[in-house]
Image: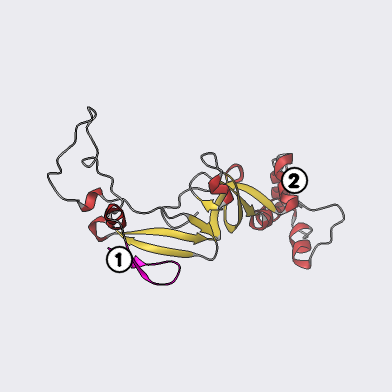
Amino acid sequence: GLRPSPSHGQVESVPSSDHAALHSGISRDNWHKRRKTGGKRKPYHKKRKYELGRPPANTKIGPRRIHTVRVRGGNKKYRALRLDVGNFSWGSECCTRKTRIIDVVYNASNNELVRTKTLVKNCIVLVDSTPYRQWYEAHYALPLGRKKGAKLTPEEEEILNKKRSKKIQKKYDERKKNAKIASILEEQFQQGKLLGESLGLWCGWA
């Protein structure tokens, strides 16, 4: 076979041993492997569509780029190649918000995936805390992740120090009884970044 030379753009010959590697796809069959006894198997049929394997998405952080993959039955799968936002749930408060993904900080399976900032299922990411802080302050009418004496914008002042009727104020007072959050979480809110776990990239979302 022939292929362009990387140095001068000339055509060079490919050794016959490499030729099969150039044209082989990803296969999930087992009939091309040897038996447990070490004996060879005779291939009694050609490759089948249902035995194929597809290359990994290796999702990176960046402007949203999603490719569709045509699968069995004419259905579609969504392969996320780049993502910069995700839907993350604050479980203890039952609050789910779409927020910006900032960085990949930990992966239990492979540190290489942290170095290359690859988004996979169950990796630990840093996300923007703003949507969750806004929800908390609107729900409990309490400041969250703010330094003492920090200036509030008119909109924030309206949410936190709004004059409410007795009935509504009573409702907020009841909520405030359960408003305490963990000190570790409070520190993260002060930094403006939360640690989250990425789940479910097979649908093109984090």
Residue 180's x, y, as percent? 72, 41
Q: Total label count?
A: 2
Q: Please state which of the two labelled residues, at mark 2 or mark 1, is closer to the viewer.
A: 1
Q: Is residue 120 visible?
A: yes
Estimate the spatial distance between the alpha carbons at disc 2 and disc 1, rounded to whole Å.
Answer: 60 Å
Considering depth in this image, is 133 or 47 the residue closer to the camera?
A: 47
Q: Label 2, on which residue?
A: 187
Can you name the residue that lies furthest to the left here? 44
**Precedes in sequence: disc 2 or disc 1:** 1
- What's the magenta region? 1-13
Residue 167's x, y, as percent? 71, 52
Q: Is residue 171 magenta?
A: no
Q: Label 1, on which residue?
A: 2
Residue in view at x 28 percent, y 45 percent: 28
Instruction: Identify which amino acid the numbered label 1 is placed on.
Output: Leu
Label 2 environment density (alpha carbons within 10 Å; few <14, some 14–19, many ≥20): some
Residue in view at x 23 percent, y 35 percent: 34
Residue in view at x 19 percent, y 32 percent: 39
Q: Callout 1: helix, strand or loop?
A: strand
Task: Tell me the number on the disc at residue 40.
Answer: none
Q: Callout 2: helix, strand or loop?
A: helix
Considering depth in this image, is 73 or 111 the residue closer to the camera?
A: 111
Label 1 environment density (alpha carbons within 10 Å; few <14, some 14–19, many ≥20): few
